[in-house]
């Protein structure tokens, strides 16, 4: 008894999927062959096997009559960059880290990119402005990149030990 009711439910379910697809792809409405329509009926009546019935569905998918849209999960952005721009070595009202306060989610990898013509580094600072070994780059030449992944929320400050007036912030939420 149980098997019989399942047999009826499946064609109804499949046909409702086909209807949804057809409403979105009206141009394909005529392209469902009669034998496919009959297959569903016959399957519901127990005249053909499940494999034969599913073959009809497979036919619809393979011939792009039934469009199955796969939705890829949106990747969470887990990468961000800080540019060390030209003029960053100077004591000036320009040439700041860009962005000066980077806001990211936990688990984000940050790349510091030295786009200046001068060597820089990235040294993490504690709340008293003392260098701590949370994230510390070697000297970065022009074009060099230093990466660090932030796994804990917090407000992180850093500076360049060659140009200590340049202080930046990474806020991790
Ligand atoms: Cu520097």
Image (cartoon, helix red, strand yellow):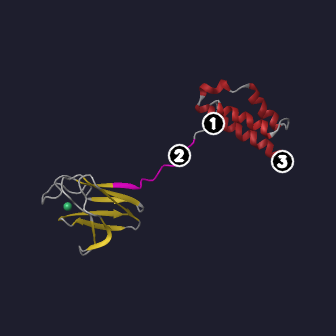
Asked whether mark 2 and ligand 1 are closer than 8 Å, the reply comes as: no
In the image, residue 146 above or below residue 70: below
Q: Residue at x 16, y 59 (%)?
A: 89
Image spot of residue 32 (x, y percent): 69, 27
Q: Which residue is mark 3?
A: 3
Q: Quadrant of the C terminus?
A: bottom left
Residue 91, compared with residue 134, is above or below; it is: above
Residue extending furthest right?
A: 1
Give how far apart the Cα atoms at labels 1 and 3 are.
26 Å
Apparent side of residue 70 relative to residue 126 in the rendered image (left or right): right
Residue 96 in the image, given as x and y percentages of width and height: 20, 57
Mark 1 vs mark 2: in front: 2
Of badges 1 and 3, the one in the foreground is 3
Q: Which residue is mark 2?
A: 72
- Asked if residue 77 lies in the magenta stretch, the reply is yes
Label 1: state its secondary structure.
helix
> Badge 2: how crowded within 10 Å, few (<14), some, or many (20+)?
few
Magenta span covers which residues? 70-80
* Residue mark closest to the camera, 3 vs 2: 2
Residue picked out by circle 1: 20
The dot on residue 160 is none
Within 8 Å of ligand 1, the CB of disc 3? no
Q: Earlier in the sequence, mark 1 or mark 3?
A: 3
Secondary structure at numbered mark 2: loop
Asked which secondary structure carries label 3, the reply is helix
Q: Residue at x 29, y 73 (%)?
A: 132
| Residue closer to the observer: 20 or 100 | 100
């Amino acid at each position: 008894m149980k098997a019989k009711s399942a047999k009826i439910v499946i064609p109804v379910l499949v046909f409702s999927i086909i209807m949804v697809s057809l409403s979105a792809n009206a141009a394909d409405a005529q392209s469902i062959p009669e034998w496919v329509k009959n297959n569903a009926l016959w399957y519901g009546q127990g005249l053909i096997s499940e494999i034969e019935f599913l073959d009809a569905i497979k036919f619809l998918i393979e011939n792009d009559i039934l469009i199955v849209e796969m939705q890829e999960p949106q990747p969470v952005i887990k990468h961000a960059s800080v540019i060390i721009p030209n003029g960053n070595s100077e004591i000036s009202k320009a040439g700041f880290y860009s962005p000066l306060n980077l806001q990211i989610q936990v688990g984000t990898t940050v790349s510091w990119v030295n786009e200046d013509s001068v060597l820089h580094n990235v040294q993490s600072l504690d709340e008293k402005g003392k260098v701590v070994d949370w994230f510390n780059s070697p000297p970065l030449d022009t074009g060099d990149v230093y990466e660090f992944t932030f796994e804990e929320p917090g407000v992180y400050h850093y500076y360049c030990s060659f140009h200590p007036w340049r202080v930046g912030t990474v806020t991790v939420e």
